[in-house]
Image (spheres, rainbow, N blue to C red):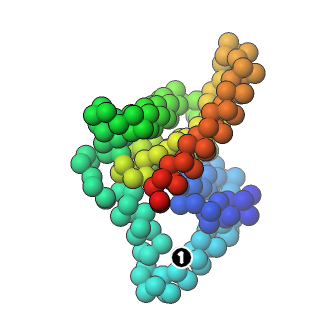
Amino acid sequence: MVLTLAAALLMHKFVWPGVLIVLAVGVWQKRVGWPVVVLTVSPLLAYWIAISMHYNDPFYLITGNVSVGLENDRQFPVLDGILQTLAEGSEGSLPDLVKGILTSTILVVALWLLATRSWAKELSLLAFIIPVIGFGLVTAPYLVFVLVRFGKLLIVPTLFYVSQHPKLDRYTGTLMPFLVLLSLLSQFAFTTYQADFFS
């Protein structure tokens, strides 16, 4: 577990809140000890220190993300990325309209999963839900489409919810191929968006 979570912290900043939630739940439920927490975050901490020393800036690792993803061209205090994207779509931009619908749908699903409390018996499921909600609330338009890429994390709590409701469990076989296809399409859409963004 330590190796998996430590690697996840080094792979992408989006997973930082989820990993921290998993560790916090583990410590609170006494399933994870503090030595495990220290071992898990040590590689990221060492990397952060090395980068900070190299560039002589303690926040170099996150400065770009904060500038582009949170501060750039904000018009609304919350939901800025989704609202601006939908606004562009309502003015005739079909790509922005599709992007706005996709991202807002993912956020609504995450909020619904939080409201259903299907995670109550397994608090670590919050690691899949909370980061999506948080990112959807605070991100600016330039990075809002990341919700489509990482919205696939919601598959885990969604299937957990289905398993808790026997009347829905029979639809799992039908739901899975659709979710797999949607996941693949979301990766393709995100790759296309990234190529256009950096071109």
Closest to the observer, 143 or 166: 143
Which residue is outermost to the top? 167
Residue 56 at what x, y percent from top left? 43, 87
The image quadrant of residue 36 is bottom right
Which quadrant holds the N terminus? bottom right
Residue 5 at what x, y percent from top left? 67, 59
Q: Residue 71, can we see it?
A: yes
Q: What residue lies at 36% left-to-right and 49% top-to-bottom?
A: 141
**Dot 1 corresponds to which residue?**
48
Closest to the observer, 121 or 43: 43
Q: Residue 164, can we see it?
A: no
Callout 1: SS:
helix
Closest to the observer, 156 or 164: 156
Q: Of the residues shown, which amino acid type is indicated by label 1? A: Trp
Residue 180 at what x, y percent from top left? 69, 34
Q: What residue lies at 50% left-to-right and 31% top-to-bottom?
A: 109
Q: How many marks?
A: 1
Dot 1: within a 10 Å radius of its alpha carbon, few (fewer than 14), some, or many (20 or more) residues? some
